[in-house]
Image (cartoon, grey):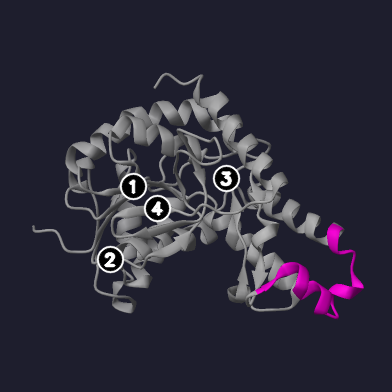
Amino acid sequence: MKSLSPKVAVIGAGNVGSTFAFSLMISGLAREIVLIDRNKNRAEGECMDLSHGLNFAHPTRIYSSGFDKCKDADVVVITAGINQKPGHTRIDLVEANAELFKEIIPKITKYAPDSILLVVSNPVDILTYVTLKVSGFPPSKVIGSGTVLDSSRFRYLLSEHCGVDPRNVHAYIVGEHGDTELPLWSSANIGGMTLDKYCLRCKKCNQCNREEELSNIFEEVKKAAYKIIEAKGSTYYAVSLALVKIVGTILRDENSILPVSTLINDYDGINDICLSIPSVVNKSGVDRFLRLKMSTQEQEQFKNSANTLKEIIRKLKL
């Protein structure tokens, strides 16, 4: 059967992969969704469950298969891997998931040499770098979900604090999607007004210890996944929506600016590492990343994030 377009392949039918497939189905972005998992029964069951709801959604062909059905996919979304457990950091997953990626990436690229690869599995920045090296794809076509979700959490908490719609908050978390990530306070703004100026004019903000409150907000962003995992085992709803945003940006050629994980070179002395930074994303993948003017402290933290990941990557046999 001839492939429909747009087509999205999802590698991994666990909580994230299947929830993303559901979110993608109801979004109407894809005409064809293929779910691929080593547990074939799980993948088949998820596809049956999804397909039974098509009467209430958009026309979509949904099925499970092997890697050969990655052929003609516009985007291959990789969610496969060992999940983060309570008490574990994302970095704790690195060796096992890196070995898994060395196994599955060649299987994907064999059938989908022209697809854009979107890496979701953790540690996402390191696995994005592994995917880049193993696939041989151009850097623009290998993207990590990065801090798109972290930035959404950040904007939500800032919106709650400031009493505004989160869609009017413009602020980014950058660097590693993990413990060395950092908030870009220097460029954060609400409705075009810098956060500093907004807080000076906000009656609500005048009643709080601003420095302490903002520090607490960032700590809550950084620890959010740990709290959710401790409470219910894993995170999948919000990240699935973040993935729909990234995939939609690619399929619709939006040129949207998203803090995805991409190969960084020649950036304030940082080279040959995948980190999250606001980037222009379109049908070609990452068109370019923005060279932001960071404060001195932010520059140091960003370099620390890069160096931390580089030390881990050096231990991998790539």
Q: Earlier in the sequence, mark 3 or mark 2?
A: 2
Q: Residues within 10 Å of mark 3 (few under 14, many from 20)?
A: many
Residue with the mark numbered 1? 140
Q: Quadrant of the C terminus?
A: top left
Front: mark 2 or 1: 1
Residue 89 in view in this figure: no
Is there a contact, CB below 8 Å, between mark 1 and mark 3? no
Amino acid type of the residue that numbered disc 1 sits on in the rendered structure: Ser
Amino acid type of the residue that numbered disc 2 sits on in the rendered structure: Ala
At x 60%, y 47%, the residue is 233
Residue with the mark numbered 4? 288
The number of numbered discs placed on residues in the rendered structure image is: 4
Residue 126 in view in this figure: yes
Magenta span covers which residues?
193-211
Query: Is residue 258 highlighted in magenta?
Result: no
At x 45%, y 38%, the residue is 265
Residue with the mark numbered 2? 30
- 88 in relation to 164, above or below: above
Q: Main secondary structure of the magenta part?
A: helix
Front: mark 1 or 3: 1
Residue 135 drawn at (x, y percent)? 29, 34
